Image (cartoon, rainbow, N blue to C red):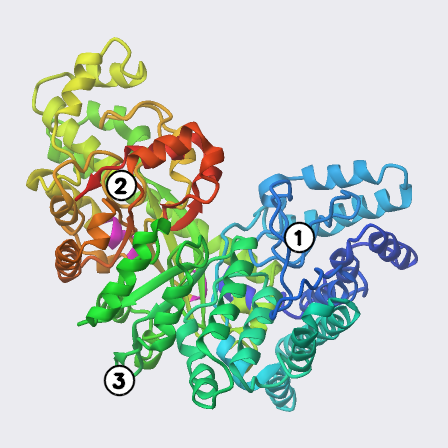
């Protein structure tokens, strides 16, 4: 479907759900009886435009959904810890955790798209129907809603079940500075414009309903706190009620109110990445400290409560440090250091430290002190390299905005408060592509150069297909799955009168994840040396792979002795540079829906084990079903020549050509982070890595003995945290395959 049709068709067109008027009221009642408030709100009005339907769904949820108990905390809401039996389709706040499956909503707001059916099909519906089996009216309402609404929306979207988490950092600073009343005034100014198009009018009016939902939630939260009897927290209760009567509807007046505004908006938006907290909270913090209204310990307590909330809901990234735009001065401040102090020994937030050029000793020392606690945080980001990469990629960033680079999810690159970044929008399984095309390319190539040229053609074709699929996916989201809360909270959606997925954000791009890069490089070098070098025939290599090296143990041993990516070998690194340059360049060629650019990344989260299960044995010596390489560094255990060799290998190609973030994991002994003389050497190593163009690195310090004991005796290590892919996790929550990959990582001194 053309972009022109998308721009003119659906934002104002009513959605005919085919539900007769005489059944609608009964269906709404039945859906409410089984806690499907979102669904009930969606079908409440016949012939309503989709924007209004989604807004009404939010409003009805806000009016009826159970609220978490107030437990005496300074910040509210604060949800209970996330349970392991919570359905996969559940959101973080709007879709609460009901022990009674009859009360667990199937359809509710969540910031990732699709709602759930793209992943699970009818399974959640069938489970809910089974729980409601004794209530035929409710079963009928659920079934009709599914068939006439969600299934129909999927069909209208061309069969697409739109994917992608679409992480985001909304404009928390604007909420703190203006309050939601400021958003309402901006919308009303738009509605007063006589030149406003009808589709824009529908959107702006629907956003007023979303603001109504926020106010309803705020009012219900005040009532919840008022009704809670905790005598020993009476002082906290009174101050919380006073603050909730101000924020988030009106501007924050203090550091406490700013934190409460952040907490409310964080939950309202369903718990994604808060962005540059040390920047937009700084003025509030400084004012209150200078006025003697708060001390450092109270600020730490508030931050600690917020980190606990992030941990409970499994939330994402906070960025600190860096520079301020447009001048580019260092943005490191006292709140930067306070945040570093408060994340020690914590799993969340996923803290990203942007290291400005010439960072002071204090910042390096503070970072090393936190990393030495063993939680894998903070990963270090080369601030200057990110700024240069984003300036040069054709993203249209202003000099002021480029300094507000932050990260969503694991570490996907975005601009705070004003960007819509597909995150992750799609994946390119590089090793899978090589595996599929290996037999044909080996048979038709007389030399390694001919083989590599041919395979890169295959890879380029898949990259084009991935970009096309992402564009179709993004268009389906824009046409049928609007994100009304983000439209409210991301600039410049209100001022443009355009929905978030429909081009409303100031900046738009897609981050695409690469998988198996190191395995590909080692496989290509193995083929060059052994097959095209004449040691083994192509037929023998293919037979060995088909047999998972059974009966070919000698070949497997020979592969194991070859140089590997991450060992600083010039020939291996030359292949890595060729493949990386080609891959990054291919993504840069394409423009997608909303005029988006495609940014390559490699941040394997915890997916590198599962993504290896779909691959057979490969020429690098990896056995069938084994994990892929963890992100963009060497394959686990192959970086045996020391940290300098590893970092030289991974900077043999231009990281700035892949500004979506290339994650590099590295392990050091703990004394490297604690002994002053060794800290100096580590800092020198990392500064050299940044000077060579490295953009990101994350460090683990957990020793082998601890990991082995945690595998054998998990009950002894319930609080052990490890860095995996692009985030930190409790070791006991990782799969057995992932635990082994952590154990296999090389440990450097």
Camera-side residue of 451 and 558 = 558
Residue hosting label 3: 327
Residue hosting label 2: 517
Q: Quadrant of residue 558?
A: top left
Q: Quadrant of residue 703?
A: top left
Q: Residue at x 34, y 52 (%)?
A: 373
Q: Earlier in the sequence, mark 1 or mark 3?
A: 1
In contact (CB < 8 Å): disc 2 and disc 1? no
Residue 593, magenta (yes or no): yes
Q: Secondary structure at mark 1?
A: helix
Chain part drawn in magenta? 582-594
Estimate the spatial distance between the alpha carbons at disc 3 and disc 2, rounded to whole Å.
37 Å
Residue hosting label 1: 153
Quarter holding the C terminus is top left
Q: Secondary structure at mark 3?
A: loop
How far across and down, in percent of the image, does residue 512 sit? 37, 52
Q: Residues within 10 Å of mark 2 (few under 14, many from 20)?
A: many
Determine whether 495 is above or below 565 in the image: below
Q: Secondary structure at mark 2?
A: helix
How far across and down, in percent of the image, does residue 97 sit? 69, 50
How far across and down, in percent of the image, does residue 659 sit? 29, 60
Q: Earlier in the sequence, mark 2 or mark 1?
A: 1
Residue 743, magenta (yes or no): no
Q: Residues within 10 Å of mark 1 (few under 14, many from 20)?
A: many
Q: Residue at x 26, y 23 (%)?
A: 439
In contact (CB < 8 Å): disc 3 and disc 2? no
Q: Main secondary structure of the magenta part?
A: helix
Estimate the spatial distance between the alpha carbons at disc 2 and disc 1, rounded to whole Å.
37 Å
């Amino acid at each position: 479907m053309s972009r022109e049709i998308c721009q003119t068709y659906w934002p104002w067109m009513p959605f005919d759900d085919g539900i007769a008027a005489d059944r609608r009221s009964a269906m709404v009642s039945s859906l409410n009886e089984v806690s499907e408030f979102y669904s009930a709100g969606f079908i409440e009005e016949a012939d309503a435009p989709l924007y209004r339907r989604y807004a009404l769904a939010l409003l009805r949820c806000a009016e009826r959904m159970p609220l978490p108990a107030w437990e005496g905390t300074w910040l509210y809401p604060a949800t209970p810890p996330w349970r392991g039996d919570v359905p996969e389709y559940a959101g973080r706040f709007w879709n609460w955790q009901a022990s009674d499956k009859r009360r667990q909503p199937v359809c509710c707001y969540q910031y990732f798209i699709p709602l759930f059916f793209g992943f699970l099909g009818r399974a959640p519906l069938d489970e809910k129907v089974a729980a409601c089996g004794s209530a035929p009216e409710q079963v009928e309402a659920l079934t009709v809603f599914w068939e006439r609404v969600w299934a129909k929306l999927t069909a209208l979207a061309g069969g697409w079940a739109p994917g992608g988490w679409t992480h985001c950092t909304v404009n928390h600073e604007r909420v703190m500075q203006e309050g939601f009343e400021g958003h309402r005034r901006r919308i009303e100014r738009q509605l007063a414009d006589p030149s406003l198009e009808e589709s824009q009018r529908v959107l702006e009016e629907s956003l007023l309903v979303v603001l109504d939902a926020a106010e309803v939630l705020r009012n219900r939260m005040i009532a919840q706190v008022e009704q809670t009897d905790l005598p020993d927290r009476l002082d906290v209760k009174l101050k919380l009620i006073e603050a909730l009567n101000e924020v988030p509807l009106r501007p924050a007046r203090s550091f406490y109110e700013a934190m409460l505004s952040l907490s409310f908006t964080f939950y309202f938006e369903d718990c994604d990445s808060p962005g540059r907290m040390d920047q937009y909270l700084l003025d509030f913090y400084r004012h209150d400290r200078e006025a003697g209204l708060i001390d450092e310990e109270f600020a730490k307590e508030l931050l600690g409560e917020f980190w606990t909330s992030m941990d409970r809901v499994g939330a994402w990234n906070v960025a600190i440090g860096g520079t301020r735009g447009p001048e580019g001065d260092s943005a490191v401040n006292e709140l930067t250091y306070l945040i570093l102090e408060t994340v020690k020994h914590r799993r969340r937030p996923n803290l990203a430290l942007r290291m400005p050029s010439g960072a002071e000793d204090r910042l390096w020392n503070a970072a090393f002190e936190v990393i030495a606690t063993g939680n894998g945080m903070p990963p270090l980001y080369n601030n200057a390299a990110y700024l240069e990469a984003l300036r040069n990629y054709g993203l249209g960033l202003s000099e002021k905005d480029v300094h507000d680079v932050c990260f969503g999810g694991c570490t996907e690159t975005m601009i705070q408060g004003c960007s819509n970044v597909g995150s992750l929008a799609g994946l390119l399984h590089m090793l899978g592509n090589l595996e599929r095309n290996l037999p044909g390319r080996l048979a038709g190539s007389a030399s390694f150069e001919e083989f590599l040229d041919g395979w890169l053609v295959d890879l380029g074709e898949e990259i084009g297909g991935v970009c096309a699929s992402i564009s179709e996916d993004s268009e389906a989201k824009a046409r049928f799955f609007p994100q009304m809360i983000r439209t409210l909270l991301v600039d410049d959606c209100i001022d443009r009168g355009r929905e978030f997925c429909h081009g409303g954000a100031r900046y738009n791009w897609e981050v695409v994840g690469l998988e198996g890069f190191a395995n590909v490089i080692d496989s290509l070098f193995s083929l060059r040396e052994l097959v095209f070098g004449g040691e083994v025939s192509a037929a023998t290599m293919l037979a060995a792979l088909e047999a998972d090296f059974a009966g070919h143990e000698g070949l497997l041993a020979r592969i194991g002795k070859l140089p590997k990516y991450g060992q600083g070998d010039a020939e291996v690194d030359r292949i890595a540079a060729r493949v990386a340059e080609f891959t990054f360049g291919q993504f840069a060629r394409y423009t997608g829906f909303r005029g988006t650019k495609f940014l390559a990344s490699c941040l394997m989260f915890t997916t590198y084990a599962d993504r290896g299960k779909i691959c057979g044995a490969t020429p690098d010596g990896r056995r069938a079903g084994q994990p892929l390489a963890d992100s963009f560094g060497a394959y686990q255990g192959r970086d045996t020549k020391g940290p300098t060799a590893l970092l030289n290998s991974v900077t043999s190609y231009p990281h700035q050509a892949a500004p979506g973030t290339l994650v590099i994991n590295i392990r050091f002994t703990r004394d490297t982070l604690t002994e002053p003389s060794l800290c100096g050497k580590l800092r020198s190593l990392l500064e050299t890595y940044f000077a060579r163009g490295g953009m990101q690195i994350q460090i683990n310090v957990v020793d082998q003995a601890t990991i082995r004991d945690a595998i054998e005796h998990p009950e002894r290590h319930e609080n052990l945290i490890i860095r995996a892919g692009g985030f930190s996790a409790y070791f006991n929550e990782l799969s057995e395959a992932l635990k082994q990959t952590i154990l296999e990582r090389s440990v450097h001194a």
